[in-house]
Amino acid sequence: MTAPALFSLGNALVDQEFLVDDEFLGHAELNKGTMQLCDAAQQAKLVEYLAEAEHKGQASGGSAANTTVAFSALGGTSFYACRVGNDDLASFYLKDLASVGVQTDEKSKSAGQTGTCIVLITPDGERTMYTHLGITAELSADQIHFDALKSAEWLYIEGYLATSPSAIEAVKLSRDIAKKHQVKMAISLSDPAMVQYAKAGLDALIDDGVDVLFCNEQEALMFTSTSHLDDAVQALLERAETVAITLGSKGALIASREQETFTVQGQAVQAVDTNGAGDAFAGGFLSALVKGQSLQEAATLGNLVASKVVSQFGPRLSLEQYQALL
């Protein structure tokens, strides 16, 4: 195994994307732009309602996985720790990661059903997700190859893990190992729903702080219980050395304890699917940092990758598209 620059922990999910309108979301009682958890029966019922909707395809997803794929495709070495089942979706998922050089371990496989996510895309490009975690809800330390973490430069944690007690414990152990081996840590708040319903879990994942915290503007305000972004930034800097807040088409705001806060302008594109945008930004950002580039250069690359992801359907680009961005 090649020593990874990035070691990531996250939920392994296979995405199914559909085009719908706002009226459909209302009938389905889904909150637009957020992720909602469900069981297998509830998800199957939603799929029945989608019989006449346009299906845009299947993709291996999961927040941290999307970030790790971008990082790897941009030239970094990576490892992804997750939990998948013993079904065909698991084979599809792990093969997809391997195709862009993301390393995994056989410990990720176990009896059960691989998680799935129904991604509903409205005409404005916003994504709404209905997720059945399957076996990934039980991600624990037993699925994590800690030797790979010991040699990494960065540990990356997705905020969606905040709903799983066993995953929170796994993250705690991972953080202890990262500290012992001087591995930097980054986390994403992942989704407004996580901030609203799993704040205690997010606090546990962040614990006594991280090197980089990723979030969007809405998540920043909700997490800090503030109404102004400047106040949110100051509160977040108490939990992270660097804060990267994505602002959609306006770009990203970067704040650091060591330098002045600044904004990097976004790319002018027609957004058709925002699924994976924040994940793509984090992948580009961390890729640049590992190469020794500045925070401004990291945010610029993050914006560029995210802008390409939102301009097409699906949470990821092709390997060729990532490499062309370099």
Image: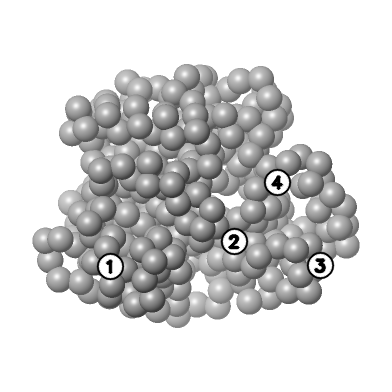
As shown in the figure, which amino acid type bears the numbered disc 2? Thr
Q: Secondary structure at mark 3?
A: helix
> Which residue corresponds to mark 2?
34
> Which residue corresponds to mark 1?
233
Across and down, in percent, residue 140 comes to 49, 26
The residue depicted at 63 percent of the width and 30 percent of the height is 135
Across and down, in percent, residue 165 comes to 50, 33
Q: CB of mark 2 within 8 Å of CB of mark 3? A: no
The residue depicted at 36 percent of the width and 63 percent of the height is 224
Across and down, in percent, residue 253 comes to 30, 71
As shown in the figure, which amino acid type bears the numbered disc 3? His
As shown in the figure, which amino acid type bears the numbered disc 4? Cys
Residue 180 location, quadrant: top left
Labelled disc at residue 27: 3
> In whole angstroms, how far apart are the C-alphas of marks 3 and 4?
16 Å
Residue 260 location, quadrant: bottom left
Q: Secondary structure at mark 2?
A: loop
Mark sitting earlier along the chain (1/2): 2
The residue depicted at 40 percent of the width and 52 percent of the height is 188
Mark sitting earlier along the chain (4/1): 4
> In whole angstroms, how far apart are the C-alphas of marks 3 and 1?
37 Å
